[in-house]
Image: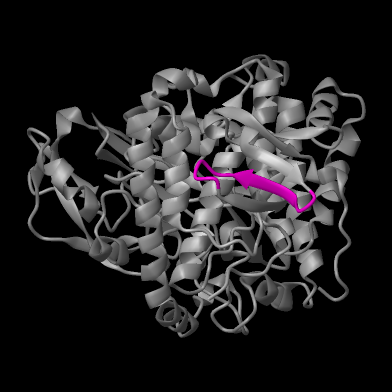
């Protein structure tokens, strides 16, 4: 097994086998992250000699580094072989004593991530074969080699690692059996459990779908419960858990959201953490309402901007009962072939050795991968630049929350899960829009640099660069962003965004491992761990690698 060969060192491709190489791959990703975030002052251990740039570990071992193409200046050289124990020993040696709890939690994350690689390797071929024989639904209007169902693309998206968070495979607290039974990369199906919640506790918006179970007692409301959250719900006073499961579903890429049918998702609290011990997958009661308010704001924008090829998932039907483990949201999807952006670099089940991206290009762009990516980046930046410049809005829509929708000869961008956006009240009012009454006031700011931080770290790094550079077409990113900014000339917000992206000496990054797990929260000083910055990397937009012929 070897990690997939791609253009950028930070590409999201996971290794395709097990054993020592998988461990070395994970160990290098972890050490890269610690170096990128300069945790414990690790960067001062870098040295340059006649043999190149090296990182001196606390044990005295010298690890050779090579230039990093995305997100950071240097990464572990590809031919270095590291063990996880070496890297975790380095972490323990440089950690602040105040971070002991975080270091222990991250050590557990690393062990769980390595085990997840081993499990995935054991099931990978069987899952790909199953997906190959699972045809796309006729309603997608797609046919030919490489077409998949919507949930199959979600499964394939789970084959790819997060571009920067090294232990993204980790599901803390879950057994091997639970991971294979419920994680999306294994393409399982399972039945939901249900609980009866006293009606006086329930806040609900929207009409229930026809498949919702009827209440046996009108004084209670049926709430769906993910099997992994059952133990937590049983402990909630006054809530009755039903013995019989009902409604077979399949997990989407986010794991806590499941597919009910080809056009319907159901988002549920999950009693685990991903992308950091503090990044809990439960659902705070106010989050669902804020997501619905954010969606309505974006729909108002789209009414004013009919030239944008953007669709929004309908996320207006939800309920909660004032508890992080009692809530749900029904997501309704539009017609067409829906392909998660996170799946683009994943292997195509029907064409060994090729990617989903290649199969899509073959069916929709006469085999021209560059044309497909250019079209995606054009829509992505047209939408996000207009939101930023005209309305003062920055979306936390990364590759997991974005999809391409193919249908009727048009490619559109589908956006979902908007509860993490950042919006400027002043800019909204100036544009003639009302300011949403968000329960979480952290969603509002009049600091344009805070908006730019979200744009750079989410739209640019994750939604654009990770995909385009990983596909070998990194030159398209600067070109598409330049084109999106051009119509705004000297507009102050456009000038700011250009200064923070195309013209910047360096690009801001998020300290995801430090904020999500390692550093004691009192020392972070960030109101939102998902918007904690402090790292920077080279501006890859100022380099324009040429694409290979016929790629």
Whether residue 218 is visible, yes or no, is yes
- Residue 518 in the image: above or below residue 113: above
From the viewer's perspective, tell me whether residue 442 is left or right of residue 266.
Answer: right
Q: Which residues are magenta?
A: 50-60
Closest to the observer: 475 or 236? Answer: 475
From the viewer's perspective, tell me whether residue 425 is left or right of residue 472.
Answer: left
- Residue 60 in the image: above or below residue 300: below
Q: Residue at x 69, y 25 (%)?
A: 392
Q: Residue at x 73, y 47 (%)?
A: 53
Q: Within the magenta stretch, is there residue 56?
A: yes
Q: Residue at x 42, y 77 (%)?
A: 127
Closest to the observer: 195 or 158? Answer: 158
Task: Give residue 366's position: percent from left, percent from top.
Answer: 79, 77
> Which part of the image, by quadrant, shows the C terminus?
bottom right
Q: Quadrant of residue 371?
A: bottom right
Task: Give residue 419's position: percent from left, percent from top.
Answer: 49, 34
């Amino acid at each position: 097994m070897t990690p997939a060969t791609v253009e950028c060192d930070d590409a999201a491709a996971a290794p395709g086998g097990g054993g020592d190489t998988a461990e070395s791959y994970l160990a290098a990703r972890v050490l890269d992250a610690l170096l990128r975030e300069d945790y414990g002052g690790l960067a001062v251990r870098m040295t340059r000699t006649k043999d190149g740039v090296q990182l001196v570990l606390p044990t005295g071992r010298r690890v050779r580094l090579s230039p990093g193409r995305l997100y950071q200046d240097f990464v572990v050289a590809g031919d270095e072989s590291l063990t996880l124990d070496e890297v975790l020993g380095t972490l323990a040696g440089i950690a602040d004593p105040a971070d002991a709890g975080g270091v222990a939690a991250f050590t557990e994350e690393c062990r769980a991530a390595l085990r997840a690689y081993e499990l995935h390797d054991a099931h990978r071929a069987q899952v790909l074969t199953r997906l190959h024989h699972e045809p796309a639904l006729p309603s997608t209007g797609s046919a030919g080699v490489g077409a998949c169902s919507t949930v199959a693309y979600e499964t394939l998206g789970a084959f790819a690692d997060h571009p920067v968070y090294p232990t993204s495979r980790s599901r803390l607290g879950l057994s091997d059996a639970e991971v294979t039974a419920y994680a999306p990369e294994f393409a399982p199906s399972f039945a939901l459990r249900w609980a009866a919640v006293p009606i006086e506790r329930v806040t609900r918006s929207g009409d229930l779908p026809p498949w919702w179970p009827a209440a046996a007692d009108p004084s209670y409301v049926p709430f769906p419960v993910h099997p992994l959250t059952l133990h937590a719900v049983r402990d909630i006073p006054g809530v009755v858990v039903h013995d019989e499961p009902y409604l077979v579903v399949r997990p989407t890429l986010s794991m806590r959201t499941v597919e009910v049918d080809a056009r319907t998702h159901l988002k549920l609290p999950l009693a685990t953490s991903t992308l950091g011990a503090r990044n809990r997958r439960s659902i705070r009661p106010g989050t669902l309402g804020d997501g619905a308010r954010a969606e309505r704001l974006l729909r108002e924008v789209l009414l004013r901007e009919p030239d944008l090829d953007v669709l929004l998932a309908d996320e207006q039907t939800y309920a909660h009962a004032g508890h992080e483990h009692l809530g749900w949201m029904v997501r309704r999807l539009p017609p067409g072939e829906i392909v998660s952006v996170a799946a683009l670099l994943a292997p195509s089940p029907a064409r060994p050795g090729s990617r989903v991206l290649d199969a899509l290009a073959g069916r929709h762009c006469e085999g021209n991968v560059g044309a497909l990516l250019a079209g995606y980046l054009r829509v992505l930046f047209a939408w996000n630049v207009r939101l930023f410049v005209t309305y003062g809005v920055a979306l936390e829509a990364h590759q997991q929350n974005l999809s391409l929708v193919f249908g009727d000869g048009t490619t559109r961008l589908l956006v979902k899960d908007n509860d993490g956006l950042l919006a400027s009240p002043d800019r909204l009012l100036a544009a003639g829009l009302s300011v949403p009454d968000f329960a979480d006031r952290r969603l509002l700011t009049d600091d344009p640099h805070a908006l730019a931080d979200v744009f750079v770290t989410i739209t640019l790094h994750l939604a654009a660069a990770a995909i385009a550079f990983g596909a070998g077409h990194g030159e398209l990113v600067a070109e598409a962003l330049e084109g999106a900014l051009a119509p705004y000339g000297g507009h102050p917000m456009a000038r700011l965004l250009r200064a923070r992206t195309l013209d910047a000496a360096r690009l801001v990054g998020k300290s995801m491992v430090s904020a999500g797990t390692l550093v004691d929260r009192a020392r972070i000083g960030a109101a939102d761990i998902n918007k904690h910055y402090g790292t920077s990397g080279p501006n890859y937009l100022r380099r324009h690698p040429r694409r290979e012929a016929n790629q």
